[in-house]
Image (tube, rainbow, N blue to C red):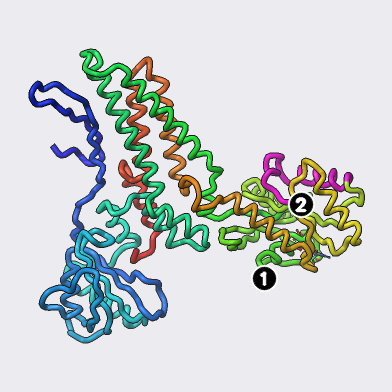
């Protein structure tokens, strides 16, 4: 019998002559809905919106051929697959020529969606695009595609795994070089292959445990089979632990590093924000307490995405609005990946030891000790210091232990700004990691959740291994289910909508 979709069932392999069960394996019908042909044919503009030289309109589904024949005037044989053909594109009802462009024919299964597909490469003016889309809508069996529907069909045809789909989505949304690299790596399937490999190992473990439960009493199963399972489970746990201990680098790179600028009023926080992003994004004034709310600016720092956040100056205030601003500032500091604590260095004691003690107290008032590990001290307004004091401070603060790295800058003269930007880039790079080196990293919070569930389920195997083998097997089974949720092989329906809704129409 064909197993029900997503259902893991045992099946027996028999030696035909004696009928003795040799081993019991698991057959996982995990092709999701592979092979389910879609009745509708969908079409959409797949290139970007707005005026452009060339626009690509994509069609996928059984009526693709009809659209090709009726709109490109092809009565005889179809063009060779994947070869561009220059044709007049006509309205199938009125026969009016709408444009002259290229048509490409991708017969199933060698297309992005796995279905018969056609592409019309037409001129990118809005009137041409509208006319061609309207004409396609008049072909029987065709309808406009929904957001992400082409990719969804590719997934359902087994052309892409769910992690690859997510990589493709990230690639479309990538705004920086490092994000592009990370997305491309995930789209190439590295992460998906890692999880699939773990999944295959667990399937084998489950088969062994089930076999042991069923046949150990008849002595048809070798001694030590459970020891093999123990070893695999233990190794997988270690691998997963390592994989999860990634300091959220991939997730951070995907969504942007949160860099928060904090400190006392008038220290020059807004000036620093403006200097970094090289435009007057925040209001600067000599009036203490000018910034009252959070000001966010998205930046590309050396290829890494950064969300730079200016906050209200930290001080006690009777003003309700300012108090709320300070509360929000503290909240953002606690959520930050990196905090830039700005200090007006013209207010520092001249003696370096006293200055260091002052800075330590100041840091304590801004953030928790743990947060100080991801912090840069920015000593601003060096233009107000005598040259000798500036140099002493620069040299001697480096010798003080227990202080975060400090940068001396002046937002007015730009002195020290380049060194500070280099330090900032270095910190951001460390927080994101190199997207191309080492093992593939986690990029989504949902992967982390399912992996944590998987690790917990493996712990259940170990807990019950010697007392209740059925419960231990259940642990391995739910570990498999958790992995299947990441790759889209099990119980993925509820998450598909969430993932595909992030895609644009035409992808
Ligand atoms: N001399 C000098 N003045 C600076 C420098 N940076 C900022 N200032 C001045 O310091 C004052 C306060 O600057 P802001 O950038 O508004 O300071 P802030 O920390 O955002 O202030 P709040 O909004 O009160 O939190 C302004 O008059 C700036 O022109 C600097 O490097 N040197």
* C-alpha gap between disc 1 and disc 2: 24 Å
For marks 1 and 2, the one nearer the N-term is 1
- The residue located at (41%, 55%) in the rendering is 167
Which quadrant would residue 417 be assigned to in this image? bottom right
- The residue located at (28%, 67%) in the rendering is 144
Which range is magenta?
Answer: 353-377
Residue for badge 2: 406
**Going by the image, does 62 lie left or right of 212?**
left
**Going by the image, does 42 lie left or right of 55?**
left
Q: Position of residue 174 (x, y in %)?
A: 48, 61
Residue for badge 1: 279
Residue 146 among magenta residues: no
- The residue located at (69%, 55%) in the rendering is 423
In the orientation shown, which residue stands out farthest toward the bottom? 96
Image quadrant holding the N terminus, namely top left
Q: Is residue 365 visible in the rendered structure shown here?
A: no
Q: Is residue 124 visible in the rendered structure shown here?
A: yes
Q: Position of residue 343 (x, y in %)?
A: 79, 54
Mark 2 Cα-neighbour bin, 10 Å: few <14, some 14–19, many ≥20: some
- Front residue (pair 97, 176): 176
């Amino acid at each position: 019998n064909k197993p029900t979709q997503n259902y893991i069932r045992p099946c027996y392999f028999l030696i035909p002559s004696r009928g003795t069960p040799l081993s019991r394996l698991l057959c996982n019908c995990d092709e999701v809905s592979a092979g389910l042909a879609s009745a509708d044919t969908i079409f959409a503009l797949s290139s970007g919106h707005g005026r452009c030289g060339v626009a690509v309109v994509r069609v996928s589904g059984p009526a693709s051929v009809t659209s090709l024949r009726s709109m490109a005037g092809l009565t005889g044989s179809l063009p060779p697959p994947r070869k561009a053909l220059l044709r007049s594109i006509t309205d199938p009802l009125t026969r009016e020529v709408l444009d002259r462009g290229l048509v490409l024919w991708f017969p199933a299964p060698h297309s992005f969606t796995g279905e018969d597909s056609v592409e019309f490469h037409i001129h990118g003016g809005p009137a041409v695009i509208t006319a061609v889309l309207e004409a396609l809508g008049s072909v029987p069996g065709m309808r406009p595609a929904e957001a992400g529907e082409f990719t969804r069909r590719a997934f359902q045809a087994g052309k892409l795994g769910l992690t690859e789909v997510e990589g493709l989505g990230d690639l479309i949304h990538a705004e920086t070089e490092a994000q592009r690299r990370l997305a491309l790596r995930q789209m190439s399937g590295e992460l998906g292959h890692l999880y699939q490999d773990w999944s295959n190992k667990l399937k084998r473990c489950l088969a062994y445990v089930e076999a042991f439960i069923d046949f150990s009493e008849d002595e048809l199963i070798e001694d030590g089979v459970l020891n093999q399972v123990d070893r695999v489970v233990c190794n997988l746990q270690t691998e997963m632990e390592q994989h999860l201990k990634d300091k959220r680098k991939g997730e951070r790179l995907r969504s942007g590093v949160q860099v928060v600028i904090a400190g006392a009023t008038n220290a020059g926080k807004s000036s620093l924000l403006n200097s970094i992003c090289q435009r007057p994004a925040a209001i600067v004034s000599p009036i203490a307490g000018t910034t009252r709310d959070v000001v966010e600016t998205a930046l590309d720092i050396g290829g890494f995405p950064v969300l730079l956040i200016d906050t209200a100056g930290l001080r006690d205030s009777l003003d309700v609005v300012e108090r709320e601003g300070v509360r929000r500032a503290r909240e953002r500091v606690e959520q930050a990946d990196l905090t830039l604590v700005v200090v007006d260095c013209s207010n520092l004691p001249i003696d370096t030891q006293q200055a260091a003690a002052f800075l330590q107290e100041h840091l304590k008032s801004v953030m928790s000790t743990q947060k100080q590990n991801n912090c840069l001290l920015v000593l601003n307004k060096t233009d107000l210091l005598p040259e000798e004091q500036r140099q002493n401070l620069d040299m001697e603060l480096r010798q003080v232990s227990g202080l975060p790295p400090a940068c001396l800058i002046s937002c007015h003269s730009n002195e020290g700004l380049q060194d500070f930007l280099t330090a900032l880039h270095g910190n951001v790079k460390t927080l994101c990691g190199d997207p191309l080196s080492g093992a593939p990293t986690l990029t989504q919070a949902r992967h982390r959740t399912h992996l944590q569930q998987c690790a917990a389920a493996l712990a259940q195997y170990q807990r019950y291994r010697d007392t209740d083998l059925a419960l231990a097997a259940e642990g391995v089974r739910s570990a498999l289910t958790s992995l299947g949720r990441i790759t889209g092989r099990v119980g993925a329906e509820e998450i598909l909508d969430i993932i595909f809704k992030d895609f644009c129409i035409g992808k």
